Structures are given as C-alpha cells and as structure tokens.
C-alpha cells in the first residue's frame, strides 16, 4: 500500500525532476553554449572574458542541478524501496555517481575563468596557449557528461523497471522508460568505445528519449501522484462484497 511518506516523496520527486530539467537546459543552452564558438578557441575565450558573470551563473546552475539530482534520487528511493529495496538502492547509487561526476562541470568552468584571469603567475604563458587551455576545460565538460551518462541511464532503467512493477504510473510510460533508458546506456558505452558513433546516431538521440521519460514522470507525479496498484487490489480483494471479518488478520 502507498503510505504518506511515499506520497510526499512523489511530490518532492516531481518538483525536483522538473526543476533540474529546467535548470540544466537554461545552464547549457541559454547561458554556456552561446559563448562557445566551435573551432575558434580565441573567440570562445573572448566571449568568456566578456561575459564572466554569465559563466558564473552557469556554475551556480550546474551546482544547483547536482543538488537537485541528490534530492531526486532520495525521493525516488523512498517511493520505490517497498517494491524492491535492493534495486531501489542500486538506482539511487547509479544516480549518485552521475551527480558527483556532474560536479566536474562547474570546476572546469572556474578553471577556464582562472586561466583567462590575467593573474601575474600566468604571464609566463602565451595568451593563445591560455586560450587553448581554457577551451580544453570547456571540452572536458563533454567528457565528464558522457562518462556519467551510462550511470544516469542505468539509474533510469532500474527506476523505470520498478515503476513498471509497482504500477504507480501508467504501464505504457514505464515500458517506454525501460526501453529509452536501456537505449541510452547502450549508446553511451558504444560512444565511449567508438567516438565517431555520433556520426551514425546523433548524440542528442542518445539521451533525449530518456529525458522525455523522466520529464513525463515528474509531470505525472505532480499532477496525478502515485496511483494504487490495480494488481494489488485484484490479488488481495477478489470480492468486495465479502465482509472484512472473513479476511485473515494480517491483511
């Protein structure tokens, strides 16, 4: 049966899932990506120097995103623990690894800012070398994400399977979650081995289906909450006309 702690955790999971999605989209696509000029480290460095506050806001966005993932994994563990404690813990730990790896992103951004800060101890390096190193730090964000992506996908796969077993959300949504998350894990591992794999399958297709699943689950939890399992009702209460005194005391 669904208890109050699970219902509260469902609201927390819904809000944290929705807010983290918005935060990471804003940080990546509205704040950071416009500053990066592909194939031009000098122009990218000039953009970073000219928009340092924007870069620092991105740092805060990424830190907030990581914190939101911590909150989300805790809430999901509370919800799914009654279904299978071991798998719920595994899902939480996979998502924890992803959240920790995500912390490399703000560190890389701060490192890029430091390289371009004109500090006295950096004067021994040529400006173009510092600009190239700053661009290297930004590129490291890409590596950190794709190292963490298999863990994110594994976490989502485990949670989707538990959603399917629990029947707390629509069955079709759970099945889509299992398929899209497993697909993400497969693509992430292939991409790490064969870095040109994204020329065959666009890298946005690696994780976008899984992201849509997680977003849909967050919206469902906020709007509908956890629904009681029909399979539980049909299994334990075969005839609603039977008097409660006829049931064993442990029901």
Image (spheres, rainbow, N blue to C red):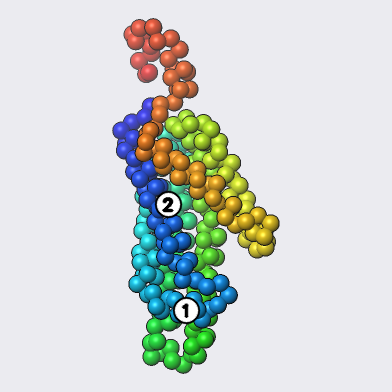
Please tell me which residue is depicted at 51% across the width and 36% down the height of the picture: 173
Earlier residue among tags 1 and 2: 2
Q: Name the residue under label 1.
A: 45
Task: Place residue 223 in its image quadrant.
Answer: top left
96 over 51 or under it: above or below: above
Instruction: Classify mark 2: residues with Cα within 10 Å, few (<14), some (14-19) or many (20+).
Output: some
Give coordinates of residue 211: x percent, y percent: 50, 48
Please tell me which residue is depicted at 39% across the width and 47% down the height of the picture: 18
63 over 51 or under it: above or below: above
Residue 2 visible somewhere in the drawing: yes
Residue 133 visible somewhere in the drawing: no
Q: Nearer the viewer, residue 241 or 82?
A: 241
Give coordinates of residue 246: x percent, y percent: 37, 8
Q: Name the residue under label 2.
A: 21
Please tell me which residue is depicted at 53% across the width and 78% down the height of the picture: 41
Please tell me which residue is depicted at 33% across the width and 8% down the height of the picture: 245
Quadrant showing the N terminus: top left
Q: In this view, does 136 lie to the left or right of 52?
A: right
Instruction: Classify mark 1: residues with Cα within 10 Å, few (<14), some (14-19) or many (20+).
Output: many
**Secondary element at tag 2:** helix
**Secondary element at tag 1:** helix
Quadrant showing the C terminus: top left
Q: Is residue 185 left or right of residue 93?
A: right
Q: Which of 244 and 183 is in front in this view?
A: 183
Count of marks overlaid on the render = 2
Mark seen at residue 245 = none
Q: How far apart are marks 1 and 2 (CA)?
A: 28 Å
Give coordinates of residue 194: x percent, y percent: 68, 61
Tags 1 and 2 in contact by the CB under 8 Å rule? no
């Amino acid at each position: 049966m669904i208890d109050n702690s699970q219902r509260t955790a469902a609201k927390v999971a819904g809000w944290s899932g929705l807010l983290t999605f918005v935060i990471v989209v804003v940080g990546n696509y509205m704040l950071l990506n416009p500053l990066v000029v592909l194939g031009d480290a000098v122009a990218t460095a000039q953009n970073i120097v000219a928009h340092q506050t924007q870069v620092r806001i991105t740092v805060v966005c990424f830190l907030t995103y990581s914190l939101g993932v911590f909150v989300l994994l805790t809430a999901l563990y509370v919800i799914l623990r009654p279904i299978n404690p071991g798998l719920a813990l595994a899902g939480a730990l996979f998502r924890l690894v992803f959240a920790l790896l995500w912390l490399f992103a703000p560190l890389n951004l701060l490192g890029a800012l430091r390289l371009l800060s004109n500090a006295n101890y950096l004067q021994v390096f040529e400006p173009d070398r510092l600009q190239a190193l700053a661009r290297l730090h930004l590129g490291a964000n890409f590596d950190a994400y794709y190292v963490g992506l298999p863990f994110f996908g594994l976490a989502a796969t485990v949670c989707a399977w538990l959603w399917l077993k629990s029947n707390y959300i629509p069955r079709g949504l759970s099945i889509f979650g299992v398929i899209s998350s497993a697909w993400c894990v497969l693509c992430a591992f292939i991409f790490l081995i064969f870095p040109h794999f994204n020329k065959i399958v666009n890298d946005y297709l690696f994780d976008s289906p899984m992201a849509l699943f997680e977003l849909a689950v967050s919206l469902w939890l906020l709007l509908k909450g956890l629904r009681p399992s029909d399979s539980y009702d049909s299994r334990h209460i075969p005839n609603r006309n039977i008097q409660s005194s006829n049931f064993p005391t442990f029901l």
